[in-house]
Image (cartoon, helix red, strand yellow):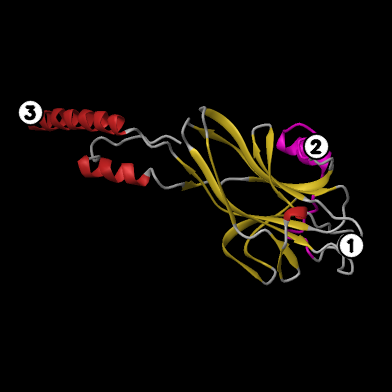
Amino acid sequence: MKFTPHFRVLTVAGLLTLSNAMAHAAPLNTWLTAGDVAQSSQLGNIDLSAPSYLLGTASLDVDDDAPLVAGALNLSGNNPLDNASLTGVIGVPGGLFDDVVNAHVSYEGSALFNTVNVQAGDTLSFDWRLFAQVNTGPMPVPDAAWLILDNSAIKLADVDSLSVMTGTWLDSGLQHVSHTFTQSGLVKIGFVVADMDSYDTSSVLAVQHIGLTPAIPEPEGLALALTGLLILGRLTSRSHQS
């Protein structure tokens, strides 16, 4: 994200305003989706406190959450995608959402993603919350949520780590993440929730307040920019007088 100065109106006060504004994240509003993705401030009766992207794993056709009927927890009217289709649509390696460390395999899921041009020092920030239906079977269901950065997947949480109940959902509570980029260029950014080891039970990842904060120039850089703008202002003033 680059700022293009408009020198005719950017005054000393304007430069100070710019330096203050750069400390706040600009929202990322353009996303591609795959699978069951919706936008809402609510998950059923749960108030999420802000507009959120909701990514789910509930099938329209199979009663993953019996005794609930098929589709009862689906968010968008679209089915989640099987793992091969999901990774193919996003454009990441096929086994990226397998939890190799804990020997869990991704079966299906949903994603929110896009490719963004970043500068070294820019900071991605967002809030997230993972929900999962209570598993009443004999085996735990380790559904997982992931942050995508290019061809890497960073696990945010899995269902096994959830212990708080909100209604009929296990709940991670609201969590915050920030990541500062060290290199400039195009970066794939995304979020994924996946059914792990089976198609049973549904999970939902809620993501909100996604923003990208530009790198803040060092004080020396701001001073140099201010000097340049003052010189340019004088030259512009002289040209108008002549």
Q: Sequence order check: which comes first, mark 2 or mark 3?
A: 2
- At 32% across and 35% down in the image, what residue appears? 5
Q: Which residue is mark 1?
A: 63
| Secondary structure character of the magenta stretch overall | loop
Mark 3 is surrounded, within 10 Å at the Cα level, by few (under 14), some (14 to 19) or many (20 or more) other residues, namely few
Q: Sequence order check: which comes first, mark 1 or mark 2?
A: 1
Quadrant in which residue 91 is drawn: top right
- At 76% across and 37% down in the image, what residue appears? 87
- At 47% across and 36% down in the image, what residue appears? 122
* CA distance separating discs 1 and 2: 28 Å
Q: Which residues are magenta?
A: 73-97
Q: Using the image, tell me which numbered label, if any, was put on residue 89.
A: none
Judged from the image, the secondary structure of the residue bearing numbered disc 3 is: loop
Q: Is residue 59 visible?
A: yes
* CA distance separating discs 3 and 1: 79 Å
Is residue 92 covered in magenta? Answer: yes
Is residue 26 covered in magenta? Answer: no
